[in-house]
Image (tube, rainbow, N blue to C red):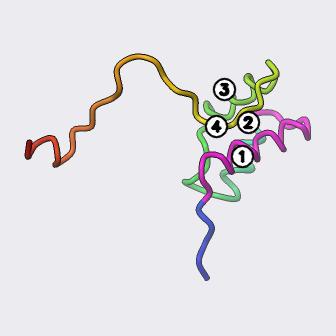
Amino acid sequence: MPSFEPNKRHLRELLIYFFNLKKSAAEAHRLLVEAYGEAALSERSCREWFQKFKNGEFDVEDKEHSGRPKRRRGIESIIE
């Protein structure tokens, strides 16, 4: 039976659910690890998202970052 691999949005929406259930960030992290193992968000990420929720920010999409984009050092950059 294939297992479900959660994406960032799914995990963040679950955090909103746990937040509304009055769980702590640590409890939410424990539940995510119990359900998804290595695919779960870190406890630090859970705390950061809970802080956003406490500030009234419930948008779970990634934000555009300003500044220089990160450069990947993969095989493509070596060949160039």
Say whether residue 61 is left or right of residue 75.
right
Q: Which mark is residue 61?
A: 4
Say whether residue 48 is left or right of residue 31.
left
Query: Does the segment drawn in magenta span residue 9?
Result: yes
Q: Which residues are magenta?
A: 6-26
* Mark 4 / mark 2, whichever is N-terminal: 2
| CA separation in Å, label 2 and label 1 | 6 Å
- The residue drawn where x is 73% and y is 36% is 26
Q: Residues within 10 Å of mark 4 (few under 14, many from 20)?
A: few
Nearest to the observer: residue 9 or residue 54? 9
Estimate the x, y position of residue 24 in percent, counting from the top left: 81, 33
Check the picture and name the quadrant holding the C terminus: top left
Q: Which mark is residue 30?
A: 1
Estimate the x, y position of residue 74 in percent, counting from the top left: 21, 45
Residue that badge 2 annotates: 26
| CA separation in Å, label 1 and label 3 | 15 Å
Residue type marked 2: Ala
Residue that badge 3 annotates: 48
| CA separation in Å, label 4 and label 3 | 14 Å
Residue type marked 3: Glu
User: Of helix, strand and loop, which one carries label 2?
Assistant: helix
Residue type marked 4: Glu
Nearest to the observer: residue 1 or residue 37? 1
